[in-house]
Image (cartoon, rainbow, N blue to C red):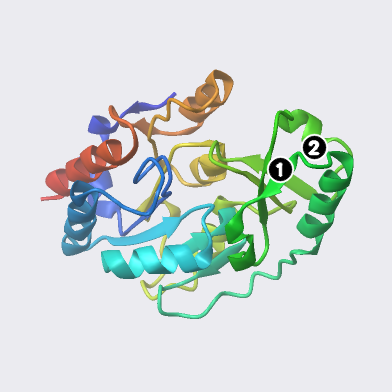
Amino acid sequence: MAQSYRNITPQAARRIRLVMADVDGTLNTGGDDLSPAVQNVINRLQQSGIMVGLVSGRTDPMLVRMAVGLGIGGPLISENGAVARLTPDGGLVDLGYSRRPALKALEQLKSRYPDRIREREDNSERLIDVVFWAEGIPAGELKKGLKDVQLLDSTYILHLMPKGIDKGKTLLKLLGRMNLGKLGKNEVLVVGDSMTDLPLFKLFPLSILIPNPNIPAADSRILRKSSMYISDHEAGEGFVEVASHIINVRT
């Protein structure tokens, strides 16, 4: 069960060389803007010698723009693990995934539920997953009959993507390719708020849950059991208090 972030010891904080943060529900509550406090603490993390990266369900172009604006140089993992680059100005890493299964599944759903499946505009920027809204259709119902794909609910949008892809596996693949020397799992802090972040919590021991009031109670219980630490506050405020604690106890 998650314990307070205040229990992160100076020894554990000093081992951290990379912070990978989700965006929506973790750094903000939606939209493209981050608060000045979040921007400031990210800058302070980097000044203290910790690299910062983003891991999100957003598109790669969106994360690149955000990373450039923040001046961060860490990995960017987009589309919930389906797309990645080692640095904001580097090329995409070939993860070997295809968008075909997700597109086929979307067409199935459109055929099954005419006029109730609505794609989001940023699908044109996506390389592997497909995002959409389903009016009045429970996720469990949508999953019936779908093959070779997984359906993820980020609370902001529904995602269709090939099975076997997740944020945790992709981050693990990137660690050996980074320009930080050999980076161990206990040197990475992962921060998230929803079930799409659960694979990160399961693979990386230093994990922070940012409480999200929009998460169903059953999912919230799973997330609390699977993460090591939890913040007091939600979204950006929660990230700021955790990052500030880490910076302070490292000195």
Extreme-front residue of the structure: 115
Structural crowding at the residue carrying mark 2, measured as other residues with C-alpha within 10 Å and reported as few (<14), some (14–19) or many (≥20): some
Residue 143's tag is 2
Residue 51 position (above or below residue 230): below
Identify the residue at horizontal 55%, vertical 51% (top origin): 168
Front position in the image: 244 or 63: 63
Position of 36 compared to 174: left or right?
Answer: left
Residue 156: give x, y in percent of width and height. Answer: 53, 40
Residue 133: give x, y in percent of width and height. Answer: 66, 42
Position of 15 compared to 174: left or right?
Answer: left
Q: Quadrant of the N terminus?
A: top left
Identify the residue at horizontal 50%, vertical 36% (top origin): 194
Q: Which residue is mark 1?
A: 151
User: In the structure shown, which secondary structural element does the residue marked by tag 2 occupy?
Assistant: helix
Quadrant assignment, res 154: top right
Identify the residue at horizontal 43%, vertical 45% (top origin): 24
User: In the structure shown, which secondary structural element does the residue marked by tag 1 occupy?
Assistant: strand
**Decide: marks 2, 1 in contact (CB < 8 A)?**
yes
Which kind of residue does numbered mark 2 sit on?
Lys
Front position in the image: 163 or 60: 60
